Each structure stands twice: as structure tokens, then as C-alpha cells.
Image: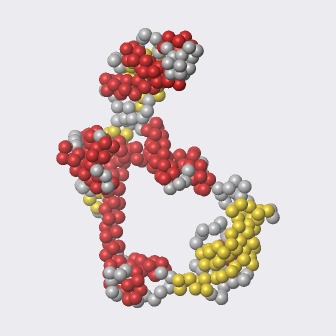
Amino acid sequence: MTAKFEKKGTNDGVLTFEIDKELVAQGLTKTFNRVKKNLSAPGFRKGKISRQLFNKMYGEAALYEDTLNDLLPAAYQAAIEEAGIKPVVQPTIDIQSMEADSNWVIDAKVILKPEVKLGDYKGLTVDKQDTDVTDEEVEEAIASKQAALAELVLKESAAANGDTVVIDYKGTKDGVAFDGGTADNYSLELGSGSFIPGFEEQLVGAKAGDSVDVKVTFPEEYHSEDLAGAEAVFAVTVHEVKAKELPELDDEFAKDVDDSVETLADLKAKIRTDLEVNKLNAAKEAVQELAIQQAVDNAEIVDLPGEMVHAEVHRAMEEFLNNMQRQGIQPEMYYQLTGTTEADLHTQFEGEAETRVKTNLVIEAIAAEEKFEATEEDLANEVKTLAETYAMEEAEIRKVLNDDMLSHDIVLKKALDVITETVKQA
């Protein structure tokens, strides 16, 4: 194969390469044998049509597209290796020549990894992180646990913020009921912000047995187009008003919260220890993130290709939507529930995507600068760690991740360690 790369811009160019006519001939035969299984022709049983008759009926060019799809990946990979380039996103393919008994000539418009000019990345200084736990934070944690054990008790007085009302409601727009606007015996905590803005506030002061007409305006960005920005009236009947009754803060409360303690003082001491551990871990993560961001800010990336950011946006979107589907939420349902579109989701991920791309480029550049490599011991340890993390056999990990993929992750971790293990706080 003869591959030629012609640079067009700072980080892009055209890779021209050929697929040998002998490989093309083999590929065409393989494609014909695959497609003929579903073909019938006069005088031939299904799947037994001859190549000569196929060419006469359909033309050999009918086999070209499938054959190219079969041959292109390996041919392209061989071409980029021969040209000594490292594209970072999928190429745009342009066919120059596809003729019988000749080499096929392909142009691939490729985007290359941009040059990274590293700045300081060792011995960086970041703001000192607060790890002290105050008495107020301990008391807030206790209050949160107290609220979690609160019981709802009926009250005869008027509803206040924080109370729960049990209601029937029926919503109408221009006097006509709308879908999803009706419910019976619904428990609503006032002040929770779970209903349309303005709804809960109008029930403050209501008592059991009251009927209240709640007038609201739906948000402009509401997921239902029929209701977005519209005025509506909810006829509400209040059946019950319940207030939270907090448990006493005593030793019995402490034992209800955590059966490993005997007294309220023990519980507070344990909460303080837990908060200290959490703050130390959070501070460590914050220091690392600040140091990495500083190393990225100190570097210069020459003409970051927009295609790299675009590809990362779509990778993140696909991962996000796949996670939604695993929870039983299809993309169309997600967009309907959130009142958003695919374009909105794309915009949401754009900023994060650019940051991730820049960070990865800088970390890769540091790994190259430090000449990090993955040893056999590194590979073995990485496989063992992944197997333990995902409860898989090491052999299964090896099937999913080859040595190149594992090595790439290992050297990036080493580059991250160079940044984070030398950082100082001041």
C-alpha cells in the first residue's frame, strides 16, 4: 500500500491511500457469496445464482458499497500507520476511484491531535482547603437526622410552611380540565417546591375542610406545550393538615439513629468523626481538581479542533441516554419529562466536553514528556484492580480491554500522579 498525507491546516489534512485490486477481488467474491443467499433468478434455486448472471442482472458495481465497508477499516488503519499520523476522530471518506480490475483509491479527511505546549505542572500551589468541622455543622447533621425521624400528626390550626396537607385537586384551563391536572388524597409538603410556582403558597393558612381556588401560571418552559405559559385554576379541597413532630434529642434518639452508640454525646462524637473524614476526602479531591485545572490552564493547545469537542459531546450524550434507558427511560420520554430537546442536551454537554478534551490532551502530553510506560507489573495490577472493582474474572477483563487500552489508562494515571502528588496548599 502507498499512503500519502497532505497537510491542509494546523491540525487537519487529507490521507490518500489505495486498496489493492487483489484484495478488492477477494472482497467482491466474499460480498457476492453473502448476498446471493437471498437472491432468486430464473433457472436457479434461491441462493444459487451464478456470478455471471448476477453481474448481468445487477452489475458488479452493486457489490461495491458492501465490499468497501468490509475492506475500509483495515485499509484505513494500515494507511495511517504507514503515514505515521494519529487521527483523533472518525475521518470523512471521499472515493476517488472504484473501478473493476484496478486499485481503489480513497481520500480520507482527517483531524489530527493538536500540539500541546506544556507549562508548569509540577509543584503547583493551590488555595488551602478547609478541613475543620464546626459545632454548628455537627448540630446541623443532628437536626437533619432528627427531621428524618419526625412523625406527622394531625393539627386543627392553619397550615404553615413545612406542614403536609392531604388534598384533592382538579386543574382547569379556560374552564376545561387537562390531562395530569387531577388527583385525590394527595400528600403535599408546603414549601417543598414540588408543585408549580405559586401553588403551595396559596395553601398556607388553609385548614382541614377548606376549599381553595389556587390560581397559577405555568412556566414558559413547561414540558407540555398546551400548558406552557398558560393560566390555570386548581379547585383544591383540604382534607387534613399535618405537622411534623420531632423526637426528643436524648440518648434514646441517639440509639434509634445509630445502634452502635449508647448516648447522644457518643452520636455527636461519631458524627464529628464522619464529617472530618468526609471533609478531608473532599479537600483532597478539590486540591487535585484545582491542580489539574491549573496544569491545563498553564498549557497552550494549538487550535483545538472543534470536531474533537463535537465527538466528545456525542459520546457523553450517548452515555447519558444509555444510562437513562437502563432505568427504563427512553430518549423521547426523557425529553418529554424534562421539557428539553436533543439540541438542549447537546448544549448542556458542550462546556464540559471542551474541558474534558483539553484535560485529556494535557495529561497525555505530560505522560509523553515524562516518557511514562506501563510495565508488565503495572498491567497485572490494573487487571487485578478492575476485576475486583467490577466483580469479574481477570480473564474477562483481558477480553474486554487489550494491553494498549490498559497501558493508555496506566500512563495517564502516572501523569495525574505527577501533578497531584507534588501540589502544595497555601
Q: Position of residue 146 (x, y in %)?
A: 46, 81
Q: Position of residue 49 (x, y in %)?
A: 51, 16
- The answer, for residue 249, to whether it is visible in the render is yes
Task: Determine the image quadrant of residue 138.
Answer: bottom left
Task: Determine the image quadrant of residue 275.
Answer: bottom left
Q: Position of residue 215 (x, y in %)?
A: 74, 69
| Image: 83 above or below 348 | above
| Image: 75 above or below 380 | above
Q: Quadrant of the N terminus?
A: top left
Query: Camera-side residue: 236 or 84?
Result: 236
| Residue at image point 35% right, 42% down | 361
| Residue at image point 48% right, 49% down | 322
Query: Camera-side residue: 233 or 348?
Result: 233
Q: What colouring does the structure picture have? A: secondary structure
Query: Camera-side residue: 130 or 17?
Result: 17
Indicate left or right for 365 with 164 as reference: left
Indicate left or right for 232 with 153 as reference: right
In the rendered picture of this protein, how many numbered marks are placed on residues?
A: 0
| Image: 143 above or below 223 | below
Query: Camera-side residue: 71 or 231?
Result: 71
| Residue at image point 37% right, 80% down | 258
Q: Quadrant of the C terminus?
A: bottom left
| Residue at image point 33% right, 83% down | 261
Q: Position of residue 338 (x, y in %)?
A: 59, 56
Task: Determine the image quadrant of residue 315.
Answer: top left
- The answer, for residue 364, to whether it is visible in the render is no
